[in-house]
């Protein structure tokens, strides 16, 4: 039923001629306080232009449900209600994790207030400062409060558009754990730190640092916007403050005449989170002996094996998967328990999207696997495993007519020939007994 | 909270106060207390010679934060020393305690490095003093490059390696089997053939005659025996066991008849029944 419905949605989508969309679905649920909904109009209209289908829900409203009959009702969820402490019954940290497990993508905004989502962030290796301590920076000298900070964006980033203008930020920083599934998107300025804005004293900062551990949230190692890609491929982005998406910051100038990069930044973050960019897949893999095209279930030790993988990248502009020659460090492993061979899988110039290599099967027999396990931060993970057997040569597969065996061959052949000659002579000769009798008779 | 900021801004705007450091100085002392280096810090540019600390050395940085043009000390909200490793991107922030009079003293004892010191390699750490206050314009002073003994590398997540290209693995193959030189094989093959010299020599002396070779009862048997030998050579060169058994069975049937005929014929001859 659900399948039928999603099929219908796809057909409806095609009929409507929606141009750009996510590789996993267009329905988005936005959980936002109705009062604040108008603060994010530019962000929302940008999403709608891209072809997303937005549904709004107040944090305390009971409907529409996140998960219906164990099936997520939306392809993506944005939680902008960062200051809400009490959510409706079905919006819990557990249900958000469940959504991730069911391949729904999330954008979650945080705030200096302690909410259920604050504790969820810790499960993603993000450590937040104590409640009530937003990010503060006195650098650069500027008008306006110290907790509204222009953050310069890395010029080259796998997720963000190149050369974005600085982004206005206000909210909480977090320290980023060493979990490799985390994808830092925006880091705090080096001069910034988390502090109580009013009444925060210099001594309390020193005291918190002396307490050791994560006593002080300061410097460029902190994250402001951090993505996390689960092993299943679903993505969640933690945003230190919902205001990054707001119209106010999108319109606010960074310096005279220079617009802020917030709008494009928000789009880039949404594009990555909603599986529009950096989405790869393995279409198929092939393996065969060199000079043959037939895929075998078993190979002989020392065979020259040719392996190829066809990889596509999702193009959100056309909504199609296009062959991608973009990977430079793809590797193939030929493993039996441990990898016996690990070799680069290089793009084939003549065929876009094809990555191929040739290697000699190890002289060990057993059940082997061709394994591609490509994980890079910010890209979807590529995994493929094909099981084949590697066997010793069959009884007639060994080399024949070895020069070392010539004496044995000649010996056997000469014995055979001698036996044949002897038989022929014995059969064809005259009976010897008769002769003997003849001698005696003489 | 917001009103406080506005007040702060108003003050900042009215005074446009700029902070500066009075008598900034750093000293390096060894563990025995001997002074190795003591220099005033220039606010304009960092010290040209990097400060090097050995295992037990102590670095002391002292200064007083004052408003420019006034001698009164100021306690800013933010007084941080930033240690930054440009090569690895590791960074450590150390807040410095400043008294109400603006006096600050920071001590870095390498025998007991603070937690804020980032993991270091052989690259020097850039040390920057960051002073921020809601009432003044911020001040950032590059102090000097700091060379400290390399520390343990930062802990890495066990799965981190799989997010980077892994080292290539090549299988070590067993060496190819070595064959003896062909001339030696040929010499031994000839040696194996040497009994033929003896056989043919002896046969030449006895000169066996074969009067019955073409007799219709003997020739088929010799022929089938020859066919058997041929079949075995064919088997060695090309055939599979199943084929050999099939062909051999057919050939065997024929051989039984030809053999029976030939042997009974010879038997008859020997007994003398003609």
Image: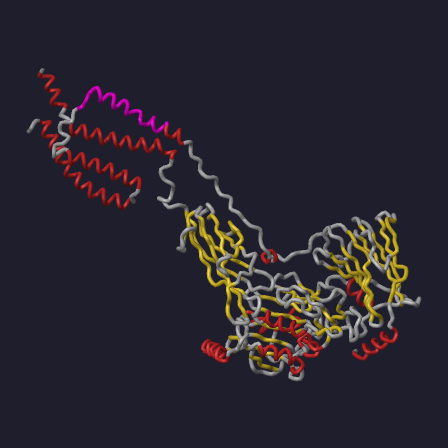
Point out the image quarter for the C terminus of chain B: top left
In the image as oriented, which residue stretches furthest toward the bottom?
Answer: A35
In the image as oriented, which residue stretches furthest toward the top?
Answer: A442
Horizontal side of residue A11 vs B133, given as left or right: left
The answer to if B204 sits in the magenta stretch is yes
Query: Image height check: is A128 above or below B201?
Result: below
Query: Image height check: is A402 above or below B201?
Result: below
Q: Is residue A127 visible?
A: no
Horizontal side of residue B180 vs A382, given as left or right: left
Q: Nearer the viewer, residue A338 or B196?
A: B196
The answer to if A309 sits in the magenta stretch is no
Residue extent of the magenta highlight: B187-208
- The spot of residue B63 in percent (x, y) is 88, 60
Q: Nearer the viewer, residue B122 or B113?
A: B122
In the image as oriented, which residue stretches furthest toward the left?
Answer: B274
Horizontal side of residue A437 vs B48, given as left or right: left
Point out the image quarter for the N terminus of chain B: bottom right
Quadrant location of residue A403? top left
Quadrant location of residue A36? bottom right
Horizontal side of residue B90 vs A100, given as left or right: right
- The spot of residue A69 in percent (x, y) is 50, 77
Query: Image height check: is B112 above or below A29?
Result: above
Magenta part, dominant SS? helix
């Amino acid at each position: 039923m659900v399948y039928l419905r999603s099929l219908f949605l796809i057909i409806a989508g095609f009929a409507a001629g929606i141009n750009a969309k996510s590789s996993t679905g267009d329905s988005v649920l936005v959980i936002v306080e109705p009062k604040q909904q108008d603060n994010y109009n530019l962000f929302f209209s940008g999403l709608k232009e891209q072809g997303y289908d937005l549904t709004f829900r107040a944090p305390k409203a009971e409907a529409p449900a996140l998960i219906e009959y164990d099936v997520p009702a939306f392809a993506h969820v944005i939680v902008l209600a960062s200051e809400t402490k009490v959510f409706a019954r079905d919006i819990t940290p557990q249900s958000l994790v469940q959504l991730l497990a069911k391949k729904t993508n999330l954008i979650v905004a945080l705030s200096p207030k302690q909410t259920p989502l604050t504790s969820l962030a810790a499960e993603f290796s993000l450590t937040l400062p104590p409640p009530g301590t937003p990010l503060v920076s006195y650098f650069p000298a500027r008008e306006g409060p110290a907790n509204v900070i222009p953050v310069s964006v890395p010029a080259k980033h796998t997720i963000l558009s190149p050369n974005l203008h600085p982004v206005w930020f206000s909210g909480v920083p977090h320290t980023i754990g060493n979990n490799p599934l985390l994808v830092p998107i925006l880091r705090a300025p080096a001069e910034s730190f988390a502090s109580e804005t009013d009444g925060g004293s210099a001594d309390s900062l020193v005291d918190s640092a002396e307490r050791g551990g994560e006593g002080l949230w300061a410097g460029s190692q902190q994250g402001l916007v951090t993505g996390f890609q689960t092993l299943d491929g679903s993505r969640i982005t933690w945003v230190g403050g919902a205001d990054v998406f707001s119209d106010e910051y999108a319109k606010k100038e960074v310096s005279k005449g220079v617009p802020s990069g917030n709008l494009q930044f928000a789009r880039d973050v949404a594009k990555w989170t909603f599986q529009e960019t950096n989405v790869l897949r393995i279409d198929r893999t092939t393996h065969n002996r060199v000079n043959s095209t037939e895929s075998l279930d078993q190979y002989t030790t020392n065979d020259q094996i040719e392996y190829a993988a066809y990889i596509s990248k999702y193009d959100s502009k056309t909504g199609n998967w296009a062959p991608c020659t973009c990977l430079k460090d793809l590797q193939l492993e030929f493993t039996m328990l441990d990898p016996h061979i690990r070799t680069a899988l290089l793009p084939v110039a003549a065929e876009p999207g094809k990555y191929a290599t040739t290697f000699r099967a190890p002289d060990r027999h057993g059940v082997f696997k061709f394994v591609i396990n490509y994980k890079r931060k910010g890209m979807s993970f590529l995994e493929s495993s094909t099981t084949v057997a590697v066997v010793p040569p069959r009884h007639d597969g060994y080399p024949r007519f070895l020069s070392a065996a010539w004496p044995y061959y000649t010996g056997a052949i000469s014995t055979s020939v001698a036996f044949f000659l002897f038989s022929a002579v014995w059969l064809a000769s005259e009976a010897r007994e008769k002769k003997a009798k003849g001698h005696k008779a003489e | 909270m917001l009103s406080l900021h506005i007040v702060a801004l108003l003050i900042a705007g009215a005074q446009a106060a700029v902070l500066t450091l009075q008598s900034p100085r750093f000293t390096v002392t060894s563990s025995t207390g001997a002074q190795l280096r003591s220099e005033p810090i220039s606010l304009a540019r960092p010290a040209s010679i990097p400060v090097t600390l050995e295992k037990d050395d102590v670095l002391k940085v002292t200064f007083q934060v004052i408003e420019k043009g006034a001698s009164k000390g100021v306690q800013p909200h933010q007084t941080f020393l930033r240690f930054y490793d440009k090569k690895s991107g590791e960074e450590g922030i150390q807040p410095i305690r400043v008294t109400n009079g603006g006096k600050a003293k920071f001590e870095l004892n390498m025998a007991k490095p603070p937690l804020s010191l980032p993991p270091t390699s052989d690259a020097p750490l850039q040390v920057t003093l960051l002073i921020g206050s809601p009432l003044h314009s911020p001040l950032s002073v590059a102090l000097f490059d700091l060379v400290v003994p390399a520390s343990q590398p930062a802990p890495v997540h066990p799965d981190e390696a799989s997010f980077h290209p892994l080292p290539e693995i090549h299988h070590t193959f067993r060496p190819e089997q070595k064959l003896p030189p062909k001339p030696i094989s040929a010499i031994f093959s000839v040696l194996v053939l040497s009994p033929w010299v003896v056989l043919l020599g002896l046969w030449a002396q006895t000169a066996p005659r074969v009067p019955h070779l073409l007799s219709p009862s003997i020739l088929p048997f010799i022929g089938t025996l020859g066919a058997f030998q041929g079949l075995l050579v064919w088997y060695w060169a090309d055939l599979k066991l199943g084929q050999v058994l099939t062909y051999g069975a057919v050939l065997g049937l024929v051989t039984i008849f030809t053999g029976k005929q030939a042997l009974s014929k010879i038997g008859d001859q020997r007994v003398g029944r003609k």
